[in-house]
Image: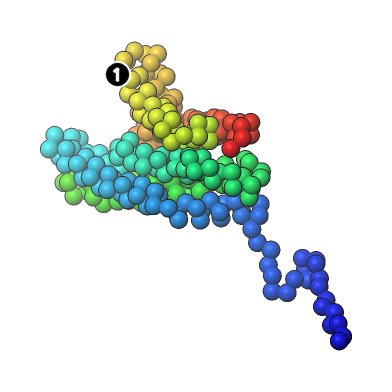
């Protein structure tokens, strides 16, 4: 019997028909994308956002007509609906993180991607992209559904509408990244949603309700208020649109940094 030697090339270039894929941030992002769309939660959240956008914007246009409000940009209906639809994206982003902690599958994720901040960045980027696309879709749908009920109490200028839709997309993306950071810091869905709801919605409402120059000034620098100034773009903000964006980015960066600090110091 003769032995037939089999030539093996262990070098990467010598592998016939094999391509090196995966690994690094690209692989981490691909894994997060696969995990996200393999469960029902994102679909439920996005459909809920679409339904709420449709109902809210139709109602907004109807009330403006019934109460004989002054003519306003039709995009204001979509922008106003964000106070509710943003929480569909918040729940989606929170679930991306806390569902893995609840099932302990986060241990496998961190074994596959041992560079911990890479896992968080992958989830944050995916949440931002989903928020960008969802913001555009919500904005366009809201304008389409609100135009009829307004019946002359709104105007449509393409450049203004596009500006408001893009601002909505940016806001939704940043809120998603903020939710990912808070979720990594708290690691429980109930805690993360409670903190985000208080920070984004409840606290601004309290500050406005209590009133006073100091509290109202503080409210101007809360994420939802700054986002509202950015999306409306009506010139009523106490600072330029660029400052509104910087405020949102600062809140988002702070949440992301808190999540990264906890992820680095505590075991899964």
Disc 1 is placed on an element classified as helix
Q: Residues within 10 Å of mark 1 (few under 14, many from 20)?
A: few
Q: Could you tell me which residue is drawn at 75 percent across and 71 percent down?
A: 15
Q: Nearer the viewer, residue 20 or 50?
A: 20
Total residue callouts: 1
232 vs 204: above or below: below
Q: Quadrant of the C terminus?
A: top right
Image position of 19 (left or right of 233) = right
- Give the camera-side residue of 229 and 253: 253
At x 62%, y 40%, the residue is 117
Q: Position of residue 243 (x, y in %)?
A: 48, 30
Q: Of all residues shown, which one is farthest toward the left?
A: 66
Give the residue furthest to the right: 2
**Residue occupying image coordinates x 41% and y 33%:** 190
Note whether residue 252 is visible. Answer: no
**Residue beneath label 1, please?**
209
The answer to whether 5 appears left or right of 138 in the picture is right
Looking at the rendering, which quadrant does residue 3 occupy?
bottom right
Q: Which percent across, then down, holds residue 185?
A: 53, 31
Residue reaching furthest to the bottom: 1
Q: Position of residue 203 (x, y in %)?
A: 37, 23
Placement of the N terminus among the 4 image quadrants: bottom right
The image's colouring method is rainbow
Q: Is residue 202 left or right of residue 127?
A: left
Residue at (63% x, 31% y) in the render? 265
Please provide percent x and percent y for residue 115: 66, 43
**Residue found farthest to the front:** 1
Residue 201 in view: yes
| Foreground residue among 37 and 80 | 37
């Amino acid at each position: 019997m003769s032995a037939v030697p089999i030539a093996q090339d262990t070098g990467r270039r010598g592998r016939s028909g094999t391509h090196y894929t995966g690994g690094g941030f690209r692989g981490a992002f691909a894994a997060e994308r696969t995990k996200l769309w393999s469960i029902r939660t994102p679909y439920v959240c996005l459909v809920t956002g679409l339904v709420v956008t449709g109902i809210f914007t139709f109602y907004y246009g109807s009330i403006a007509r019934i109460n004989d409000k002054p003519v306003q940009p039709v995009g204001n209906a979509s922008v106003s609906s964000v106070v509710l639809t943003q929480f569909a994206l918040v729940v989606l982003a929170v679930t991306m993180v806390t569902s893995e902690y609840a099932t302990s599958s986060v241990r496998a994720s961190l074994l596959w991607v041992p560079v911990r901040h890479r896992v968080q960045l992958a989830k944050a980027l995916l949440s931002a992209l989903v928020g960008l696309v969802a913001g555009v879709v919500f904005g366009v749908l809201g304008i389409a559904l609100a135009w009829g009920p307004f019946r002359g109490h709104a105007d449509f200028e393409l450049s203004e509408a596009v500006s408001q839709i893009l601002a909505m997309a940016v806001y939704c993306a940043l809120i998603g990244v903020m939710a990912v950071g808070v979720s990594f810091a708290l690691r429980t869905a109930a805690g993360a949603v409670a903190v985000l709801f208080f920070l984004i919605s409840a606290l601004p409402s309290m500050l406005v309700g209590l009133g006073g120059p100091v509290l109202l000034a503080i409210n101007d620098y809360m994420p939802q208020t700054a986002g509202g100034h950015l999306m409306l773009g009506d010139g009523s903000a106490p600072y330029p649109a660029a400052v509104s964006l910087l405020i949102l980015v600062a809140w988002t960066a702070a949440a992301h940094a808190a999540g990264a600090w906890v992820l680095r110091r505590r075991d899964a």
